[in-house]
Image (cartoon, rainbow, N blue to C red):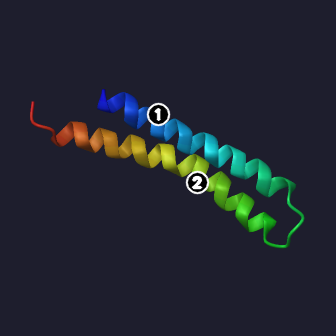
Amino acid sequence: MIKRVFAAIVAALLIGMYVLTLIFGLMQDPKTKGLLLASVAATILVPVILYVYQRIYNLFQDK
């Protein structure tokens, strides 16, 4: 049950990052490029960090 809730939260976070990437890409502001790059980096790094965390947790979990 907890895994499903966690997966739903992560999915919502990723969808939010995609929406922010789209919004930042359409803005006409000098800061847009930096915001867009930060959003794209977060879109790539957040799933990688979560995967590494999950692997480490499973490695050290008592079975």
Identity of the residue drawn at 78% across and 52% down = 23
Q: Estimate the spatial distance between the alpha carbons at disc 2 and disc 1, rounded to whole Å.
A: 18 Å
| Mark 2 or mark 1, whichever is nearer to me | 1
Q: Secondary structure at mark 1?
A: helix
Of the residues shown, which amino acid type is indicated by label 1? Ala
Q: Is residue 30 above or below residue 10?
A: below
Dot 2 alpha-carbon crowd within 10 angstroms: few under 14, some 14 to 19, many 20 or more: some
Residue 17 lies, with reference to residue 9, above or below; the image says: below
Question: Which residue occupies 85% across, 60% down?
Answer: 27
- Position of residue 45 in the picture relative to residue 24 (left or right): left
In the picture, measured across the screen, residue 25 lies left or right of residue 4, that is right
Q: Earlier in the sequence, mark 2 or mark 1?
A: 1
Percent from the top left, x then y, of residue 61?
15, 38
Q: Are marks 2 and 1 in contact (CB under 8 Å)?
A: no
Q: Which mark is residue 57?
A: none
Q: Position of residue 16 (x, y in %)?
A: 62, 46
Q: Crowding near pointer 1: few (<14 within 10 Å), some, many (20+)? A: few
Q: Which is more toward the observer, 58 or 6?
A: 6
* Mark 2 secondary-structure assignment: helix
Residue 8's disc is 1
Label count reads 2
Q: Residue at x 58, y 54 (%)?
A: 42
Q: Residue furthest right?
A: 28
Q: Position of residue 37 (x, y in %)?
A: 70, 59
The picture quadrant where one finds residue 60 is top left
Looking at the rendered structure, the kind of residue marked 2 is: Ala
Q: Position of residue 17 (x, y in %)?
A: 63, 48
Determine which of the numbered discs, if any, sits on residue 42 in the image: 2
Q: Quadrant of the N terminus?
A: top left
